[in-house]
Image (cartoon, rainbow, N blue to C red):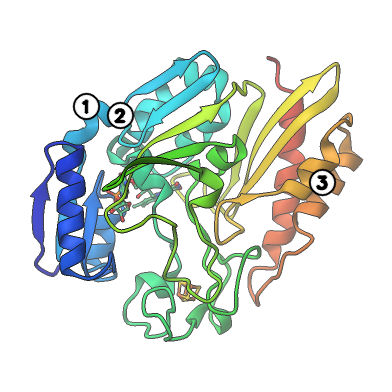
Amino acid sequence: MRPFAYQRATDAPSAIQALAAAASANDALTQASVQPLAGGTTLIDLMKLDVIRPTTVVDINPLAASWSNVNIDGDNLRLGALARMSDVAARPEIQQNYPVIADALKLAASPQLRNMASLGGNVLQRTRCTYFRDVSYANCNKRTPGSGCAALEGFNRTHAVLGTSNQCIATYAGDLAQALIALDATIEITGRAGVRSLPFSELHKPPGDTPEIETVLSPGELISAFAIPGRWPRSLYLKVRDRQSYEFALASAAIALDVQDGTINDARIALGGVATVPWRAREAEALLKGQKLDDALAGRAAEAAFADAKAGKHNAFKIALGKRVISRALQQTAAMEI
Ligand SMILES: Cc1cc2nc3c(=O)[nH]c(=O)nc-3n(C[C@H](O)[C@H](O)[C@H](O)COP(=O)(O)OP(=O)(O)OC[C@H]3O[C@@H](n4cnc5c(N)ncnc54)[C@H](O)[C@@H]3O)c2cc1C
Ligand code: SF4
């Protein structure tokens, strides 16, 4: 691992100040400048692999006293960005009112990782594309802009079929983000100018021509919390992976339904493992509203979700798998006893 400066923030202003100072000394928050450190389960990994090369790491864990709370106020849930994945997944009020969040957290990574990892770090984790994580491959536009994309003609079994570009087809790897995007979460961002809010759906940027730019966060900004409107007891996260022990999704679906007398009033569908960013399947949702769910309708919704999918040489199976995941997840959600 390369040498780097370690700074421990004492509070939010000192974290923002340290990040901003290091960023301005390096022109921008690039892979060679400054990184906040939460649980470290992505950051330290990628530093050891020499993929991320910060000159300064700012430890934000001392902010946990104020940034790790979990509150339900009326019908609104607020999750602090430094809350640990395992702590949130274990909360009875989350399991009861937001099972899609509890499921997405429990099915992610391993118990040891979930004990360390924060919610903020989870949604900002990087892709698992082998060519990105192994610096012996020269061609990765995300790691080295303009160098090409080894995955386009390489082994792309785990890569994305939705939201791709001819510059990058890397899959967004996380699970929690699908639950958050499905529930119309907003994120609270703390930076030099104070606190601002943003729909979670606007946080991640599809690769387009600049796959190295993954989010809309500005230099020196931190995610401080997530806010989720409403309660969604009829919701779940279904994840299919190569093995049941800790593994990333090949295809997953976060589903939330509001059903009255068998009719779907509101439907939320988000997909993981198949897209370059957390993926909301709005065309599929539109088909479900005002309808009663049956096999045929679930199938049509699944078809709509993948209508624009584009497969590479090795990942066409994800389209068929993703459709089956949506159909099964819809049926399981509709059958939940609330
Ligand atoms: C073997 C293995 C298996 C895994 N399997 C899964 C899986 O199945 N599903 C899944 O979802 N994840 C999986 N993960 C990923 C894991 O969940 C993430 O590494 C973890 O959630 C990241 O959280 P962290 O707090 O450790 O983040 P860190 O590593 O500390 O940070 C990650 C990134 O976010 C930045 N950051 C952190 N907090 C903030 C903040 N508040 N504001 C702004 N920037 C911030 C950091 O600078 C860094 O760039 C796996 C990881 C491993 C190693
Ligand atoms: S898919 Fe993206 S991350 Fe993977 S090699 Fe291509 S540019 Fe790099």
How many marks overall? 3
Amino acid identity at mark 2? Ser
For label 3, the crowd category at 10 Å Cα-Cα, with few meaning under 14, some 14 to 19 and many 20 or more, is many
Q: CA distance from mark 1 to mark 2?
A: 6 Å
Does 173 sit above or below residue 77?
below
Left or right: where 273 falls relative to 23 = right
For label 2, the crowd category at 10 Å Cα-Cα, with few meaning under 14, some 14 to 19 and many 20 or more, is many
Quarter where residue 181 is shown: top right
Q: Do callouts 2 and 3 mark residues in contact (Cβ within 8 Å)?
A: no
Q: In the rendered structure, which disc, 3 or 1, sits on the residue that comes first in sequence?
A: 1
* Label 3 secondary element: helix
Q: Which residue is mark 1?
A: 65
* Residue 245 screen position, x and y as percent: 46, 44
* Residue 80 screen position, x and y as percent: 35, 31
Quarter where residue 190 is shown: top left
Circle nearer the viewer, 2 or 3: 2
Q: CA distance from mark 3 to mark 1?
A: 43 Å
User: What residue appears at the point 56 percent right and 27 percent down from the top-left corner?
Assistant: 229
Q: Which residue is mark 3?
A: 301
Determine which of the numbered discs, if any, sits on residue 249 in the image: none
Give 170 or 65, whichever is nearer the viewer.
65
Image quarter in which the C terminus is found: top right
Circle nearer the viewer, 3 or 1: 1
Q: Which residue is mark 2?
A: 68
Amino acid identity at mark 1? Ala
* Label 1 secondary element: helix
Q: Is residue 310 visible?
A: yes
